[in-house]
Amino acid sequence: MSVTTEAAVDDQQGAGRRGTGPDRRPTGPGRANPLAGWLFLSPTLLLFAVFILGPFVVGLGMSLFSYDLLTPPEFVGLDNFRQLVGDSLLLRSLGNTFLFAFASVVTHLVGGLLLAIAVNRGINKVLSYFVRTAVFFPFLISWAAVALLWKYVLDPTFGIFSFYLKGLGIEPPGWFTDPAWALPSIIGIDFWHTIGYTFLIMLAGLQTVPSEMVEAARCDGANRFQTFFHITLPMMSPTMFFASVITFIGAFQIFDPIQIITRGGPNDATMTAVMYLYQTAFQAFQVGYGSTIALALFLVIMLVTLLQFWGSRKWVHNA
């Protein structure tokens, strides 16, 4: 090998060691022009800033003021938060809301899973399509229409449900006028309206369970119950966790049927946190205190969601 060739090879190797060789880093329009990436993200960032971050910052600021929409805001510092601690009606509304959310999560998880199992049992495709449509269809109806529908169906005087109960010799209760029945009635209406969404989530999760594992368990002598509790449920745990989180968040913000049917009554039996927030801020015009309640609700939902994520480490089995 000639001296010139050896020198050229040494120069190339030295350049490679010094990092001055050809640039092998990935290239593309996003790396060449980072502005393009931000332009693609700008609509989402703008919507987030206008409809989420902006109202949150404004609400946080308004919680430090006393404001009735008619007179200039008056700075009161932490007085709204002190009032929050001693508000007995807020505590009762939170209790009603937690009861509603707990009942909603339990009924949706159990009911949605049972419906999904029934549809996934290999029934006729036409019947399966009909059941899916029938169960999911109420979810497509607006809350206003659903609330008005059930308000008349359960009317104790001329409601169709009460009519058939009277035909059986049963005196119908005051579904929305009796404090003992008002909240359970709202829970039942919410279940009828939203179970279709949970049902589809459960059905999708159920269809991801590997059939090979189920067949292997059957070959080892496991019966249906053992297969369900030791194979299907553990494999379904991520889906159930997701359903529990979104169901709780949605249930904790329940407002429409209560506003249309009971308006928080009777005797505050259906007064939920969001309903109390609405009455405080938009009926009593205590906007500053209403902002404080909204901030408290945000913290409660965030805390419960974090607890759900923490607890999921003990029972959610990620494949």
Image: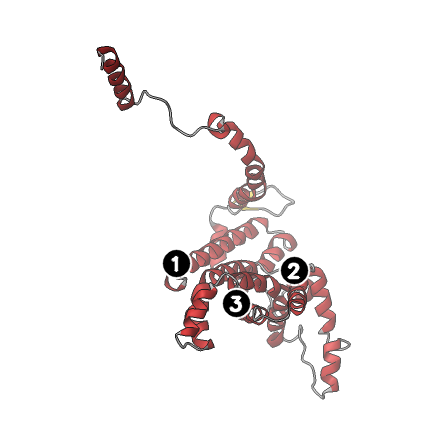
- For the view shown, which residue lies furthest in the top direction? 4
Question: The residue tagged with tag 2: helix, strand or loop?
Answer: helix
In this rendered view, identify the residue nearer to me: 254 or 259: 254
Q: Position of residue 264 (x, y in %)?
A: 63, 65
Taking 258 as reference, is 32 above or below it? above
Taking 29 as reference, is 318 above or below it? below
Which mark identifies residue 66?
Answer: none
Which mark identifies residue 109?
Answer: 3
Q: Position of residue 198 (x, y in %)?
A: 57, 63
- Mark sitting earlier along the chain (1/3): 3
Q: Residue at x 66, y 69 (%)?
A: 127
In this rendered view, identify the residue nearer to me: 222 or 190: 222
Question: The residue tagged with tag 3: helix, strand or loop?
Answer: helix
Q: Residue at x 56, y 71 (%)?
A: 121
Q: Residue at x 43, y 75 (%)?
A: 226
Residue, disc 1: 310
In this rendered view, identify the residue nearer to me: 210 or 241: 210
Q: CA distance from mark 1 to mark 3?
A: 19 Å
Q: Which quadrant would residue 220 be assigned to in this image?
A: bottom left
Q: CA distance from mark 3 to mark 2?
A: 22 Å
